[in-house]
Image (cartoon, grey):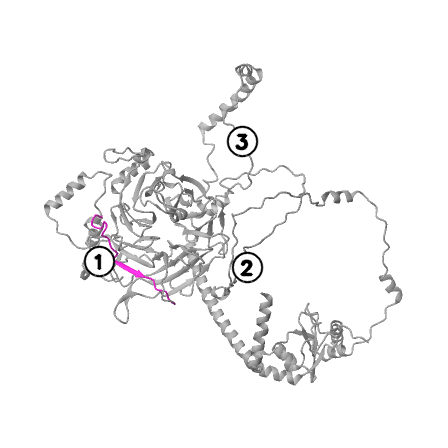
Amino acid sequence: MPQKRPKSATSSAGKMKHKDRKPESPAPIEKPDHPEDIFPMVLTSVTQELFGCRADEDVTSESPYKLLKKDDIIQDIKTRAAVSDFSPVKQRVLDYPDDEILLVFDRDFIYGQCFYLVMTPEAKELILNPPEPEEIPAEIECEVNKTPEPQKWISLGSELEIEEESVKETREKLYFVFSKERRMFGGPVCFSDSNAADDKYGNLGCPSYQDSRFSIKQMQRDCGTQAAPTLQSSSAQTQWKRKKNMCTQYKPREFSQEEKDNILQSESLKNFCNLVTPRMLYALQQEEIMNVFLDDLKALGTCPEEGECSGKDSAELMLYQAFTDQTYSKDRTISCINWHPTIYGLIAVAFTAKKEQQSDEPTSSDVRPSHIVFFCFSNPYDPQLLLECPDDIYAFEFCPSDPNIIVGGCRNGQVVLWDISGHITHLQRAQSSGKKVSVNTDTFDLDDNKEKKTPVVRCCAVSAMDSSHKARITDVKWLPPTFEVTRLGVPVENQYNTSVQVVTCSPDCSIMFWDVRLPKPLNQSALDRKKTEDQKVQMTPYSVPDTFKHLDRTWKPLLRVSLPNINTSEEYVPLKFSFQHYTCKGNTDRNTEEADKSSEIIRDFSQLRLPSAKTLTTLEDVNTKFYIGTEDGEIVYTDWKLEKDDSGRLQSAKPLHCFSIHSWMVNTIQRSPFFKDIILTTGGWKFAIWKEGVMDGPIIVSPISEHVITVGCWSLSRPAVFFIGKDDGSIEVWNLLEKTSEPTQVHAHITNAKITCITPWTATPKQHILAVTDDLGVVRVFEIPKTLYIPSKSESLNVKKLFELEENRLKDYLQREKLSQKEQKEAEELEKKMEPNEPLKSEQEEEDTHLKEYREYMVLE
């Protein structure tokens, strides 16, 4: 008699077990996946070999049973410990009363595993000796197997609808033949492997992109329609995907004079005017009495919570102003923007040629001078000031001590200085009045009429070409006025309390420190001093000032820092950098007179001299370590101080750490304005947040984005908010207190081109502005809503706790990963010890094997 499936046997065994128990005790609750009398388990190949229960060899679907000795199982648990497959049922094996335990081969995975162990003698007996099945009456079996008789099909017209909806080919099929050139036949093919272990998280992303080389035109579509109410949707600042033919009427169509006279004398027009005139006068009267366009919901509260209760969604970026100029922005991109620190609504924009134009050899007609253009809110159509540049500017910055001093980095590697102090009155007057100020044509004469109205400022000083960078300057920053550095990179006290040193970065694998002061005191007679004063008095507002005349064409770097690679003999290629600004706490016993004298010093850079090294006081609490973003997407943490090697030569120190987080060049490294040890970096398809002092990696890493991230910046008023710009023209707003895995807001189609710069600015306490530039040379200024610039209660404290939690999470993750690797290594070593040694093959056998593999490869090729 054929045996029944083990499932029924074990279930019946469970029922008999419940009957033998006393009625007072509650019945045990069985698990939903398998009965309590059995235990599903997985046996490795080693365990199957040891106990002689190899699947489909020792045990099969016809003979699935195997009796195992209890002592052998206990000995295996003692020998192999946690590696043994019977360790989960150790206690139940020890409590088993008989000497043999039944193991059943579950080929169909009825209970989820390939084997299961019978844990009670009653269940074992029922499986080995199942009871005879009860006979089923023949009448019932006939009723169950009775097949319904088919009925005749009656047509109701549905076959016509099916025939109409069926798809039929209406045009001939297209045949394509793909071939390659004859010379490419039989050519070598080279494949390479990409190791997923190179990435920290073990994944390699291949983001999709839109191929602009071809487009598929849809010729035929089969679709159904359904009656629905008319729906109309409208949008603003969005890209219209569907294109349709439109026409514009540029010539008005008018009635004839006879038709006009008939309409003016008609009774219908008189009745209409008599009916509408009182209502129109009433509306005009109401407009004079009160402002009907006043937004009452906006005036209900000032905090984000009250704004949400008002029922109005005010979390969108609103376009406030746009700047562009065809003379300077046509066929150009924007590389850097900066708001003027003191003048309201004045923004400086640096235009550079696009990469396509840089690669081609420019002709004489295409060459245009490079400028930094100043725009203002009062007159967005015309530039207010032009800074003449020797080459395209990729980065520039206002001096924190004197906003009239501007430093910039050129494409040819030179550092440039401007002084716009003679044009501040012109800029302030233009901003306040909204009208351009006339320019003296005697001192300013250009061929273009438009450029005659715009003042042009020539550079005061340019660094020496031989001592400058050998590639474009990608980042420029002023050192804070609290300290300066020596030629060895040692931070010392700044006696002038003025920013006098500049740090530049370039892909020529170097970072340079520049000093704008005179190298040594110059003896000047009283007559020469009088001539200089007379020149200052007679100097016109549009002449070149002599502020940095001592540096022009002779300016050399004070300190050069190289970036040696940690693992190789090569160097890193830096693009951006960020260092911690030092705030001088000062001694409480310091004389107040010295502080008053330093505050009264007039910042005249032409009179500043390099102090003697003996008078400088070394500052021990200045952090000389800084972050660097490279061209390959690496974040390098290094020190700018020079060290002596074994031979006594001064050289740059090896970087402390290097992390390959970004898959592409790093375009942003910015410190939080609220936490000086928190840094935001962007590059490739990710952004990361770092904490200085945490050497294990970033504390927050974003998911992989669909589009390339081009720029990022922190909010100036909310510690948890920052903005991310992408190459598809969209801006993401992230709030770390709400979500850390996705943005809280996505403003799509801010522009149709790649976003190049994002710079926030606090105009007034109630007006916060965000400037966004794109690859087409357009500057868009957006007004930030209240929900994004008014911080919530205890937001700074909550963000600080969040960073601490993320730091602890990173440490725990690294510890668990280290422990997991250690356990995996131990398991592999144990598995190698347990595996039997394979017999060594002879040389003839190995040669035959290689020959066979080579023949198979040739056949496949």
Range covered by the magenta-colored residues = 548-567
Label number found at residue 567? none
Left or right of 443? Residue 780 is right
Crowding near the residue tagged with mark 1, few <14, some 14–19, many ≥20 C-alpha atoms within 10 Å: few
Crowding near the residue tagged with mark 2, few <14, some 14–19, many ≥20 C-alpha atoms within 10 Å: few
Magenta-span inclusion, residue 114: no
- The residue closer to the viewer here, 81 or 145, is 145
* Earlier residue among tags 1 and 2: 2
Is 329 rendered above or below residue 29?
Answer: above
Q: Residue furthest right?
A: 139
Quadrant location of the C terminus?
bottom right
Quadrant location of the N terminus?
bottom right
Is 740 rendered above or below residue 822?
Answer: above
The residue singled out by tag 1 in the image is: 590
* Earlier residue among tags 1 and 3: 3
Marks 1 & 3, CB-CB < 8 Å contact = no
- The residue closer to the viewer here, 308 or 328, is 328
Separation (CA) of disc 1 from disc 2 = 84 Å
Point out residue 716 in the picture as x, y percentages from the top left corner: 39, 50
Magenta-span inclusion, residue 554: yes
- Res 540 quadrant in image: top left
The residue singled out by tag 3 in the image is: 247
Q: Main secondary structure of the magenta part?
A: loop
Please identify, in this view, whether the residue under mark 2 or under mark 3 is nearer the observer: 2
Marks 2 & 3, CB-CB < 8 Å contact = no
Separation (CA) of disc 1 from disc 3 = 77 Å
Label number found at residue 185? 2
Left or right of 112? Residue 731 is left
User: In the structure shown, which secondary structural element does the residue marked by tag 2 occupy?
Assistant: loop
